[in-house]
Amino acid sequence: MTPQTISDQTWAGIRTEFTLPTLAQVHRRLSELMEDPEPVMRQLVRVFVDDGTFCPGFQFLPGGQLQPTVTALFRRAMELDIPHNYFTLWMITPSRALAGTRPVDHLKKDPAPLLRALEAYL
């Protein structure tokens, strides 16, 4: 995988479509929802933009819990040594392996095709 610069425009698009709260904002919100947010914090997709750490909103279900498909995909991405920022980019980029649709558009479906598409990303 060739490192590429992810544009400010891309991050702005993610912020607009899915939200892109800071890590501190997510920690605060999870602390309101649960006694010990640390186990959930360790599973978060984080992106590093300029000097900040953010959490793409596509990984959250309404109510603040983590989307299980994103958690499973992200765990696999970490095993494949795909950096957080590139995993996030992959999630929002149309994929040939998914007939030109974005992985993020398949989160409520069977995760197997997403895992295969992630493997093909390398």
Image (tube, helix red, strand yellow):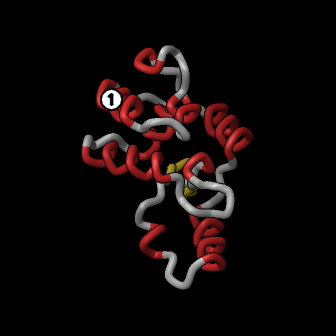
Residue sitting at x 55%, y 40%: 108
Q: Quadrant of residue 104?
A: top right
Residue 44, placed above or below residue 50 = below
Point out residue 37 in the picture as x, y percentages from the top left corner: 51, 76
Q: Residues within 10 Å of mark 1 (few under 14, many from 20)?
A: few
Can I make out residue 57 in this image? yes
Residue 47, placed above or below residue 66 = above
Q: Is residue 67 left or right of residue 115?
A: right
Name the image quarter holding the N terminus: top left
Residue 75, placed above or below residue 115 = below
Q: Quadrant of residue 122?
A: top left
Point out residue 100 in the picture as x, y percentages from the top left corner: 52, 15
Q: Quadrant of residue 21?
A: bottom right
19, 109: nearer the viewer: 109
Point out residue 117 in the picture as x, y percentages from the top left corner: 37, 27
101, 1: nearer the viewer: 101
Q: Is residue 63 left or right of residue 85?
A: right
Residue sitting at x 33%, y 29%: 116
Residue farthest front in this picture: 110
Query: Which residue position is annotated with label 1?
Result: 116
Disc 1 residue type (three-letter): Arg
Residue farthest right in this picture: 16
Residue sitting at x 69%, y 38%: 12
Q: Is residue 100 left or right of residue 74?
A: right
Point out residue 114 in the picture as x, y percentages from the top left corner: 41, 32
